Amino acid sequence: MKGIHRKQSTGKRQESILGWIFCSPYLAFSLIFFLLPLMWAFWLSAMDWNLMGNDKTFVGLGNFAALFRDDKVQAAFINSYRYLLPIVILCFAFGLLIALLVSQLPEKVKGITAVLFFIPYLTSGVATSVVVKYLLAYNSVLSTFLREKHGIDVNWLMDKRSAFAIMVILVVWKMSGYYALFILSAIEGISEDVNEACALDGSVGLHKLFHVTLPMITPTLTTVIVLATGLAFGIYTEPYLLTGGGPNMATTTWQLEIYNASFTRFQSGYAAAMAILNAIQIFVTLRIINVVMDRFNRRFGW
Amino acid sequence: MKRKKTVRTAVAAVLTVILLMISLFPFYYMVVQSVLPWDRIDKELIPTGFTLRSYEYLMGTGGAGKSYIWLRALWNSLAVSLPTAVISVVCGLLIGYAVTKLSRFNGKKFIMDSLLFQMFFPTIILLVPKFMISKGMSNSYPGMILPLSVSTWAIFMYINYFRTLPDAVFEAAKIDGAGPLVIIRKIAFPTTKSITTIVFLSIFMGRWSELMWDMLISPKVEMQTLNVLISTQFKPMGNYPGPMYAASVILTLPIIVLFLCFSKYFKEGISFMLK
């Protein structure tokens, strides 16, 4: 009894000390690998510096002004929306398709099927790039087949349109099964009552999909769109290995251009400014999406 | 009614199988090409021959100039991914508990604000400065592990999870005189099975597939992860295709096996990610 009493009187301080101890690994990490680099990044963005040398010149907003004249930056800026649109739409469409199919299957095989669709998500972009590059090479079984049987002779990764389409397909292929899990989980969350009511009212098929199922899962739709947006802004491995951002910057991304500016051209200050512009673009885009989706959700009573 | 349902299930099953075949085709292709004789690679969809030459090649110098370099790369991948996943889980668990269950902890708001602030910035902003800070640790495991070791996503997963647990259990344990570490180990941790599985595997997988950071911080071939070694060897006029396929199989297989083993915890975990 005495022990408990003592514990309660000194409990507040004790708990606070304990809390800070528990959070200390995170706080130490954040200080060294987040806060410090973050301030450094903003400072760098006002500098002209080549990463290795000692000469740093203060250029103020000069780097930012130069960004707007850089065709690589323009390409990265525009490409992020060119990626965003088809990736969000296709990921959601395929995710929904997979989720609807899996939800129709017998309970016993549902889990394993969902996991099988999830496998592409687990694959490193490096392994996929190996397969795609060799599969699309001039002498591969696919190219030979298309050339000899159908007269289609495309240098897939050297053509602007097909190279871009391949990047989109790779991302959609990779992510659809992952988003399907979210959508499936939401569909399964729709209560039996609703399904029974639909059956009684004769609402089936596409009518049920558009008037019952989709409105019931709009919050998940928001989640998927926000996640896919983040994804579209983070594309790096596939264009780095397959196209180098080409042909003629058709497949380039922010990540690729920032990497190149920092570590192949050694324009570190300039690259920092580029990354900040990228962050602003992501922030504004996500804000717009949130506002739009909020309106949309409210229409369906969420 | 019953009949209609059977038909619907059958149609769904057929469509599912077709979609699965498309979605898993790259893996089939990768495995087939990795065991084909070298003169037939990329020329056949259905294998007419079988050889382990591509894998044997990787056991030697594997075209990368040093012996056992591919095995070393596989080890490096493991040596980097495993600690990263463990650190993320431990950090997430501790903070999740501190923020939700230590009701009198005076730093709760500060920690939450700091997490939200951090999530607001895309990590690409930090690339150059982070590299400058970590340069002294280049070509070492700490240099690869530490700068990427804490995940705000993992922390939020635990915070959201612990919020759903009733406080009463923890209060009871406290009154019984259990110390905080005992409470975490004996009471909190065992209930987190599905969350811990999903966090551990996701972080492990993400780290296993990391390219940019590992490429920058570990240029030395002995310290490269499998992911980086493949991407540096796989260039026009680089290595032979056979061994590249074999290495890709080795890169992909462990992750898939790991996920299949733990897939039963998965659905539970996913429903938490939605919150």
Image (cartoon, rainbow, N blue to C red):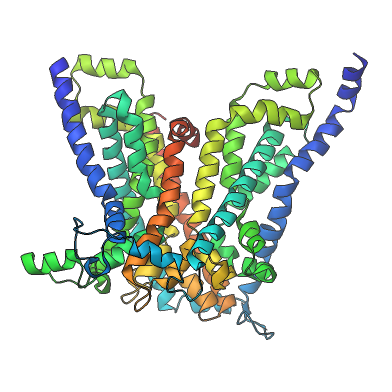
Task: Give how far across and how far down residue A186 sits, in percent.
Answer: 38, 30
> Relative to residue A106, is residue A296 drawn left or right?
right
User: In the picture shown, does residue B100 fall above or below B61?
Assistant: above
Task: Answer left or right for B10 relative to B226.
Answer: left
Residue B205 screen position, x and y as percent: 49, 50
Identify the residue at horizontal 67%, vertical 83% (top origin).
A56
Count of marks overlaid on the render: 0
Query: Would residue B25 appear left or right of B85 to someone viewing this image?
Result: left
Q: Position of residue B162 (x, y in %)?
A: 62, 30
Left or right: residue A158 versus residue A31 is left
When the figure is inspected, residue B88 is found, relative to residue B144, above or below; the finding is above
**Is residue A300 in view from this perspective?**
no
Q: Quadrant of residue A29?
A: bottom right
Q: Residue at x 74, y 53 (%)?
A: A28
Image quadrant holding the C terminus of chain A, namely top left
Q: Is residue B64 above or below residue A83?
A: below
Q: Residue at x 12, y 64 (%)?
A: A145
Please state the horizontal and vertical placement of residue B185, each as a whole percent of the image: 69, 31
Q: Quadrant of residue A94?
A: top left
Q: Is residue A3 above or below residue A82?
A: above
| Residue A274 visible to the viewer | yes
Q: Quadrant of residue A181?
A: top left
Q: Residue at x 68, y 34 (%)?
A: B97
User: Foreground residue, A213 or B50?
Assistant: B50
Q: Quadrant of the N terminus of chain A?
A: top right
